[in-house]
Amino acid sequence: MKDSLVKEFLNMLKKDEIKNEFKSILKPIIDFILYEINPYIYITVILVFMIFIMILAILVILIILLRNKQSLSIIF
């Protein structure tokens, strides 16, 4: 009984007009969710970019310090 019901439901979902109707029902919901999430996406992208810049700056500082330390160790 359950298998036949599930198969009928899946067969019904394979029809193009059902797919289009399902998309048209869900489109406003998805648009609203994306509209609400949009500021958080921008904030996340900005934070990731800032973290990348900070890690890059730390790498440059470490390279400079290691070069200075090596040149100091050669002198002494």
Image (spheres, rainbow, N blue to C red):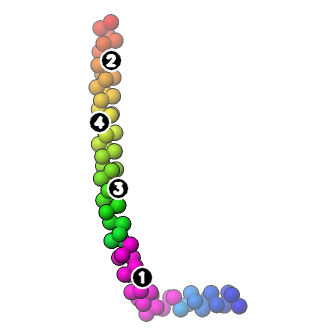
Residue under numbered circle 3: 44
Please name the amino acid that badge 4 sits on.
Ala
Residue denoted by label 4: 57
Residue ID for mark 2: 69
The answer to whether residue 40 is left or right of residue 12 is left
Q: Which of marks 2 and 3 precedes in the sequence?
A: 3
Tell me the CA gap for discs 4 and 1: 45 Å
Q: Secondary structure at mark 4?
A: helix
Numbered range of the magenta stretch: 13-33
Of mark 3 and mark 4, the one earlier in the sequence is 3
Q: Residues within 10 Å of mark 1 (few under 14, many from 20)?
A: few
Q: Amino acid at mark 2?
A: Lys
Q: Spatial distance from mark 2 to mark 1, Cα to Cα? A: 62 Å
Secondary structure type for disc 1:
helix
Residues under numbered marks 3 and 2 in contact, where contact means CB atoms less than 8 Å apart: no
Q: Quadrant of the C terminus?
A: top left
Residue 31 placement, left or right of 22 = left
Residue 16 appears in view: no
Q: Position of residue 21 (x, y in %)?
A: 42, 90
> Which secondary structure lies at badge 3?
helix
Q: Are marks 3 and 1 in contact (CB under 8 Å)?
A: no
The amino acid sitting under disc 1 is Leu
